[in-house]
Amino acid sequence: MMNNVYDALNQQTQSKKNNSVPAHKPRMSKQEYAKYMKDKRTSLFNMANEETVKVVSSPQSFLHFLDMQAKMDYTVTNILLIIAQYPEATLLKDFSHWQESKASIVKGSKGIEILEPYGEYTRRDGSIGISYNPKTVFDVSQILNGEHFIEHPPQYTSNELVSAIIYKTDIKPEVVSQDSKLPSDVYFDEQSQTVFVKESQQPFNMINGLLREYAYVECYQQGLSRSDASFVAESAAYLLSKKYNLENFDTSFSQGCMNHFNDMDQFTTKKELESIKSISNQINERIEHGLYALQQAKQDKKVERNSYTR
């Protein structure tokens, strides 16, 4: 009888051992962690490089790249990583930021890995480089009831957008008659340093034309001729048009995608994509300042009107 009691105790002890929580894996040493992070970064950079070739392989894939760049203000490298892993993404946040929004990630959702800058370092040649760490984010489509978290961009009137595009620019637009002999309805003339705008245009067409021609202006100020700047300027303008939800932008420029990137290696192609983003950023910075100035002017008028009614 006594032996049976001890047998029962031994069985319970053995059962507890079998069902116990697995021991935690030992922490990586500093050297192991550094190697892990280095390998992860290398893997992500390789993924971005591979995607670089894909996004310029057809007009459709190139326009999709520009669409994604317009939707999300990420680096070119991260846009390439997002397209490679989750091409339908629209709004990304990491786990902690979704938690702050009281959002729950759908069970089984796979995170999207991007590269987050975390500091600078000095290269051997004395130049400054940026260090990156892998970061996992999730798209709003991976969130329970994600439609409640979708951010709707502000809507602007045609007048507001036109005023913002030309805000504090050195090269001013000039309205000319409809029968003027210009190559297009909106046209930057290098010789006279003027952006000519034909009268009686549809608002969206005129705004798209202004975006295109001021992209040419930016390229011209960087020393590029109109013919050399053509593809980059059109791409940057299309990106801005999508960013501000405009319609009817002529996408025929994208047909020259494969020819434009034909002789470029991955590094040069990526630099060209970064040039497109840079041109659009320069114009967009002015647009944002212009829209802010308009908003402030409205606020000032509102305060002024209120002071009169007191």
Image: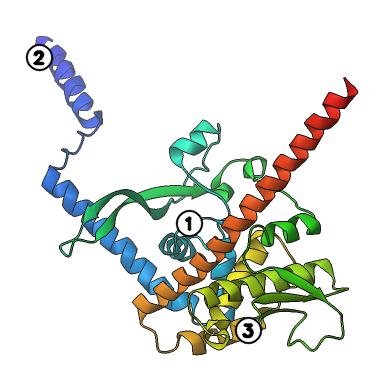
Mark nearer the N terminus (1 vs 2): 2
Mark nearer the N terminus (2 vs 3): 2
Amino acid type of the residue tagged 3 in the rendering: Gln
Residue topped by disc 1: 74
Residue 266 lies, with reference to residue 131, above or below; the image says: below
Q: Which mark is residue 191?
A: 3
Amino acid type of the residue tagged 2 in the rendering: Asn
Q: Quadrant of residue 3?
A: top left
Q: Residues within 10 Å of mark 3 (few under 14, many from 20)?
A: few
Between the C-alphas of marks 2 and 3, the distance is 106 Å
Q: Residues within 10 Å of mark 2 (few under 14, many from 20)?
A: few
Quadrant showing the C terminus: top right
Task: Give the percent coordinates (x, y) of residue 171.
Answer: 64, 69
Amino acid type of the residue tagged 1 in the rendering: Tyr
- Residue positioned most to the top: 2
Closest to the observer, 163 or 277: 163
Quadrant showing the N terminus: top left
